[in-house]
Each structure stands twice: as C-alpha cells, then as structure tokens.
Amino acid sequence: MAHEDLLEGLTPAQREAVITINGALLILAGPGSGKTRVVTHRIAYMLREGIPARSILALTFTNKAADEMKRRLMLLAPGEQVWVGTFHRFCGTLLRRYAEQVGLGQNFTIYDSGDSLTLLKQVIKDSNIELTHVTPDRVHQAISWAKNSLVSAEQYEARPGHPLGQIVAKLYPLYQKHLLLANAVDFDDMLLHVANLLQQQPEIRASLDQRHRYILVDEYQDTNLAQYML
C-alpha cells in the first residue's frame, strides 16, 4: 500500500480513517484511543496524495491540543504549512481580515473573560440597573450562552417570568454597544461575528469554501451551536 510508513502501527480501523480522504467522515473513539494520531497521520497522508497544505484546515478546542497536533505534523510532514489551531484563533484570524464588515477596526482588542466581566460590571453601574437575585457573573454567563447560541443582542428576548432573562435583555445590548465603542470583542464575539459574517456574506463564504476544501475537527462532539454552524 502507498505511504506504508504513515500506516505502520495503526489498527485496521485507524488505517481506514487515515486513507479515507473524500466525503464526510465521522470517527467515534474513546479517550486514549489515538484520535490525535489518526488526525495527524490523515493530514500527512493527504499531503502525500498531493492535496495542497493551504486546502487543509484542522480545528480543535485548546491551545495545548493544537500545539500537540502541530508538533506531530512537523515530524510527519516537515516544512508543510497546514493551518492548525483552535476555533477562536481561526475566527480571530478571519476577523482581522474582515473586521470592517462587522463594524470593527482591524486593530480591535480581544477581551479575555476577566476584561469582559469588568466591562459588564461598569455597564451595570452606569445603567443604574440593580441586581438583586443574580450576580454579574451569572449575567455574564447568560450573555455568553446567548452568543454561543447565535443570539445577538438585537435578537435576544427574555422568556416570560424569567427574571434573569429580563435583566440580560436590558444589559446585553448595552454591553455590546460598549464593546464596539471600545473596538473590542470578547471570546464569544469571535465565533458569533464570524458565523454571522459567513451567513450574511455569500462571496466571503464561497472564497473560504474554495480554499478550505478539507476540514478536520478534533473532539467534534464538543462543538456549541456557533462552532457547529461555522
């Protein structure tokens, strides 16, 4: 079989996964069963088969996992520039390129969870909205949940009889307004902005579709709605 060195030591099921290139493929595997090995060997196999590195996109959830995939790929396919990283890093890269499309400058700031919570607390203070039965952290979590569910500040509606939702309905738009005024995004915005961009801009979506012909997602079952839609 071609490229036997890449298949050496793999189980029959792993071999099948590595050499199956075209079409949708879902691999079910438990912890410690060699998922990262299969993903990296599959990418190396694709490269050996003549697929350009720029056509391959590998996404995962943590920087640690992405770094490990990069390390293994360097050993399997030295010199090849495959894009490997987290969903957030990938979306951050796209946002830098298309920032103006979502009302941002290219030099926008990315707020971590601490920065975004501090901003939300300032918004709460400035708006004179009293939090009696909920904490700023809980409001922050609710806004994060909304963004990961692709619910924008304009679309958010509180369910009847839901006190937290009523507070979020007031604070979410104000919080989002302050983010844009500061030319900033939080982690969840990175996914939300890009998902909306791809839905609303067919030309950009078509361009990215043409480039990223092969997409591999590690730990696919952990995707939230925004990541799934991406």
Image: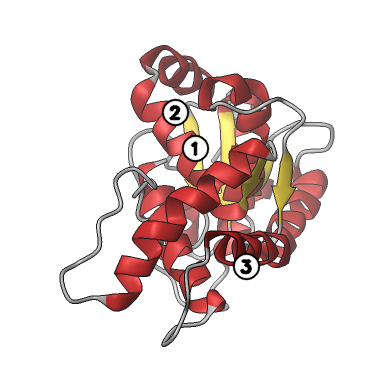
Residue type at numbered disc 2? Leu
Residue 86 can be seen in this image: no
Residue drawn at x 74%, y 42% is 109
Q: Would residue 31 appear left or right of 152 to someone viewing this image?
A: right
Count of numbered marks: 3
Among all residues in the image, which is located at the extreme front?
Answer: 128
Marks 2/3 in contact by CB < 8 Å: the verdict is: no
Q: Mark 1: few, some, or many residues within 10 Å (few <14, many ≥20)?
A: many
Q: Nearer the viewer, mark 1 or mark 3?
A: 3
Q: Which residue is mark 1?
A: 193
Viewer-side residue, 153 vs 129 = 129
Work out how far the residue at label 2 is from the one at label 1, CA to CA, in angstroms.
Answer: 6 Å
The three-letter code of the residue at mark 1 reads His
The residue depicted at 76 percent of the width and 49 percent of the height is 70
The amino acid at mark 3 is: Lys
Instruction: Residue 2 in the image: state x and y as whole percent.
Output: 58, 36
Q: Nearer the viewer, residue 62 or 152?
A: 152
Residue furthest top in the image: 203
Residue positioned 42% across, 42% down in the render: 20
C-beta proximity under 8 Å, tags 1 and 3: no
**Secondary structure found at label 2:** helix
Residue 123 placed where, x, y %? 59, 59
Q: Is 11 drawn above or below residue 47 in the view shown?
A: below
Residue at disc 1, secondary structure? helix
Mark earlier in primary sequence (2, 3): 3
Residue for badge 2: 197
Q: Quick check: marks 2 and 1 in contact, CB under 8 Å?
A: yes
Residue 58 placement (x, y as % from top left): 58, 44
Say which mark, if any, is on residue 10.
none
- The reply to whether residue 149 is visible in this rendering is yes
In the image, which disc is placed on residue 121? 3
